[in-house]
Amino acid sequence: MPMRTRSNTTLIRPRALALLVPLALTLGQSSLALAAQGPELATERAAPDLPNGPIERDEAAKLEYLSDFFVFAGREASSDGKPGKGLVFAFDANRGREKQKYAAEHFAVLWVEGRGWVDLDVTQSLPGAAAQFARAVGVGLPTCERAQVAGDAFAGLTIEVPKVALKLVAEPIGVETDRRNGGDVFLTGATKGRLTLGERAFVGVVHHEFTYLVGVNPLAKTYTDLFGEGFHSVYALLGAKDALRLHRTGGTLEPLIGRHSGYLVRDGAEAGAGELPAFKLETAKKSLGGLFRWPGRYDIGWREGAADARRRIEVKVDLKDRETLINYVFGGVAIAIASGELVDGAQREPVLGFTLIVL
């Protein structure tokens, strides 16, 4: 179902976005076609070493689901050293299996400061293939003419969208979070990235979420209890070159992804050192969305430091240019741009990023 922003830019509502949107947006069953010849795959390589060891697939399960979700948040490179215009690009590659039937899907959105949301014409269903489940991590991602993918998160990735002359180049991801629950897996991490849009160049960070679920496939079935009271998230550039990601959720996914989870990765820091301590995320500036209210701001805070010298760190971001993907009357799914700052004593750093909201 096409929708329009205030700038009259057409966006196609996806059925899926990474771990979260496919589970949140799936309203009915999708057809799963068993393709005689699967889709093209990006270059494969051996599975990477992970903090909690290799991922073991449950090939006997009737349902399996894989997702790789990437968010680039950056600013236009400038010769005078001043912050340039901001840009946010989110891309998702989903794969599902129901017995011997396979499906895949791409989803992508682009926001450019001064233009708003830009139509990419990338969101679409793709043929699935058994090869996409041959190795849970390290297998090539689906690629197609509209969204050309090479490499993978852990070896370095390139994504191109020819329609708008977009090219994202991401360095290998450093894993910050490796969570397991039964056979399910949730990985998060970040790296440096560079994105070109025509002749314009942007530098920033790339966030990655990898999800493997057993007994669940939102490309084939409908789920209503995954997020409990909701899901709130931020995938952001902090300052000029650091990465900030966090979420708050509930529901049946909470044991896997955590009620509150996130990281703050400083440039040059060792992978795995950025996981955030316990934090609170409060919503404010709410606006009517049906028989519910969309948040207009996140107020987030946690404490760091030794016991005798703990200090409070706060992140306050306004949620602007909200695009409602689904309105259920009693809830909905939306994306927005997070814009604000992190405050650590007298130090203030700008925050710019992508937000996914599920209510």
Image (tube, helix red, strand yellow):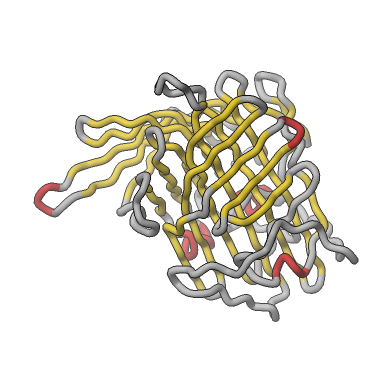
Height in image: 292 above or below 18? above
Q: Residue at x 71, y 20 (%)?
A: 8
Height in image: 298 above or below 253? above
- Could you say which quadrant of the image residue 282 lies in? top left
Question: Is 285 placed left or right of 29 in the picture?
Answer: left
- Counting from the top left corner in percent of width and height, residue 356 is at 55, 41
Whether residue 330 can be seen here? no
Q: Residue at x 34, y 36 (%)?
A: 315
Q: Nearer the viewer, residue 95 or 76?
A: 76
Q: Residue at x 86, y 65 (%)?
A: 34
Q: Residue at x 52, y 62 (%)?
A: 186
- Could you say which quadrant of the image residue 273 lies in? bottom left
Whether residue 322 can be seen here? yes
- Counting from the top left corner in percent of width and height, residue 211 is at 58, 61
- Counting from the top left corner in percent of width and height, residue 78 is at 47, 23
Question: Is 269 placed left or right of 84 in the picture?
Answer: left
**Which quarter of the rendering shows the C terminus?**
top right
Q: Nearer the viewer, residue 103 or 148?
A: 148
| Residue at the front extreme of this rendering | 79
Question: Is 281 placed left or right of 164 in the picture?
Answer: left
